[in-house]
Amino acid sequence: MKLLRFGEFGKEKPGIIDKDGKIRDLSSHITDINGETITSENLKKISTIDLSSLPIVPNNTRLGACVGNIGKFLCIGLNYSDHAAESGMDLPDEPVIFFKATSSIMGANDDVEIPRNSVKTDWEVELAIVIGKTASYAVSYTHLTLPTNRE
């Protein structure tokens, strides 16, 4: 099941990709794709829908952030050896944990707004994991080694 959000910024609707790669509008079944709607129960319900019965979303429609109504965006920095090396830093003994503003989350093809007077803008992509249940102290981390070739 491939879920997504589509539409104008701030007014995204839930969608699903069918077997032919077409985006279908799920808004008649769920209000959004977020922590409240992607429960086990709702995912089971969605899996029973005849996707061909759902309206097709036009190809040129904007894709939004994959999940809406985000409460927290926790990040772990210097979490693999190449990242530490390119930063000129040693691997930390413990994860470097920091927050990102949820306003920095954007759609797949949205323009990146570079701050006024910026002289160096770094780019990065975050891998996010959505925890579908209320959790406390649910931290797990692994040191990864990823390729640094960015071409």
Image (tube, rainbow, N blue to C red):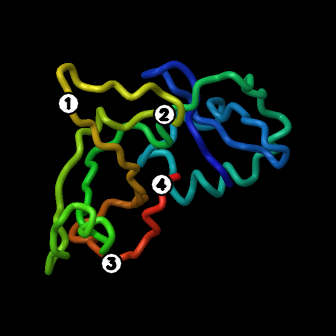
Binning the other alpha carbons within 10 Å of mark 1 as few (below 14), some (14 to 19) or many (20 upward) gives few
As drawn, 72 above or below 102:
below
Residue kind at label 3, given as amino acid type: His
Residue sitting at x 79%, y 43%: 21
Instruction: Give the Cα separation between the discs numbered 1 and 3.
Output: 31 Å
Circle 3 SS class: loop
| Direction from residue 69 to residue 96 in the image, left or right | left
Q: Position of residue 10 (x, y in %)?
A: 42, 22
- Horizontal placement of 66 versus 49: left or right? left
The first of marks 4 and 1 along the sequence is: 1
Q: Are marks 2 and 1 in contact (CB under 8 Å)?
A: no
Q: Which residue is mark 3?
A: 143
Q: Earlier in the sequence, mark 4 or mark 2?
A: 2
- Residue bearing mark 1: 119
Whichever of callouts 2 and 1 sits on the residue coming sooner in the sequence is 2
Residue under pointer 4? 150
Residue 26: x, y in percent?
A: 66, 35
Q: Which residue is mark 2?
A: 107
Quadrant in which residue 63 is drawn: top right
Front position among marks 1 and 3: 1
